[in-house]
Image: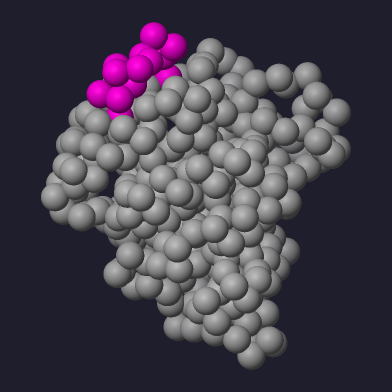
Amino acid sequence: MCVYRSFIRPLLFQLEPEQSHGLAHEFIAKGTPLLAAFGKKFIYSGSDLKVSLFGTTLSNPIGLAAGFDKNGDLVHGLKYLGFGYAEIGSITGQAHEGNSKPRLWRLASDDGLINWLGLNNEGAVKIAERLATSKFSVPIGITIAKTNKPNITGNAAYEDMLLSFRAIRHLPLMYVALNVSCPNTLDGVLEETGILSSVVEQISKENAANLPIVLKLSPDSSDKLIEDMIEMGKKFSIAGYVCGNTSVSRAGLNTAEAEDIKVGGLSGPPLKPLALSLCRKVYELKDKNQIIMGCGGITNGQDAYDFIRAGSSVLQIYTSLVYEGPSVVRKINEELSALLKRDKLTLAQAVGIDCSAKARQ
């Protein structure tokens, strides 16, 4: 019997989604000794899923996606949930309270979420100060986005993102992601502001520590936009891509109320086909040395295997943690390991195996 699904989740789901999130966040932040005591229950112990990401060896390929630990409060305890790594943020140049409530909805019939939080965070400088004195229990990446204020445009948006990078560039981070595709803000996708190329170029000049830079792409992007982003990534030696972010799509949902929620980004199993398609497109276009971090609707080992075969070297989850509980990371890893053994493949051999032979060369 799954204690979380049978007992804990029904209690949490009686609360508003943000209240439930807050309780889970508080427990991880302050309940580390208890998590440590039960840590082996959630940690995959096999060595077959070890993977190198930007020169760092991860115990497994499952990471915590951005959005759960926005302010870097949980970095000391995440290993006890079984994660191989985690992505903090998105952080922004200015502190921001986010969008007005309600701004987070459960889609119970789809095991999904719609998120309209709006990049609520304490601001890059304060978060950087916290992380500078924190002990990372797993390797950490961090995501930068533009502050969610419509008046921050043009040169102000450029300076806003550079402020965030300058605040965190001295930290011992595994990578920095640029969130150019968030549908949860008042002014939408950063690509439309026309500043992204300038931001990437300037970060490349100021990146004295040679932190790997990745781009977080949208599953809603047109083929032309994806091609343009990959070309820019090659020009500025981008290390990889997160494929992808949440989606504005509401197609094929079983939760009738979802049609009435006109704002925010969809996550969970309904997102998987879009995110997988994005992975395949990016894998076909990217340079061989650029990596893909697959994200979108990963709930079990088969989902993880599908993303790896579509070109992802590592993966990220968030929504499945809400619906499946803290044992989901170990479950995904165990099922993924079994699938690889069934097909007599290593993790590295499986990456992109369903894509064209040309893309794998």
- State yes or no: residue 157 in magenta: yes
Residue depicted at x 24% and y 53%:
211
Q: Residue at x 71, y 19 (%)?
A: 262
Residue 358, position in %: x, y? 59, 73
Q: Position of residue 63 (x, y in %)?
A: 47, 58
Identify which residue is drawn at 33% across, 65% down. Answer: 54
Asked which quadrant contains residue 116, the reply is: top right
Q: Quadrant of residue 110?
A: top right
> Which of the 4 quarters of the picture holds residue 359?
bottom right
> Is-magenta flag for residue 251?
no
Q: Which residues are magenta?
A: 148-161
Q: How far across and down, in percent of the image, does residue 297 sit?
A: 66, 51
What residue lies at 40% left-to-right and 67% top-to-bottom? 289
Looking at the rendered structure, the number of numbered marks drawn on it comes to 0
Above or below residue 234? Residue 287 is below
Task: Determine if residue 7 is in view.
Answer: no
Left or right, 54 with respect to 119, comes to: left
Compared across the picture, whether 21 is left or right of 275 comes to left
Quarter holding the N terminus is: bottom right
Q: Residue furthest bottom?
A: 344
Q: Is residue 43 left or right of residue 113?
A: left
Depicted 213 relative to depicted 165: above or below: below
The answer to which of 255 and 359 lies nearer the viewer is 359
Q: How is the image coloured?
A: one colour
Q: Position of residue 231 (x, y in %)?
A: 45, 49
Q: Quick one: 111 or 274, which is closer to the camera? A: 274
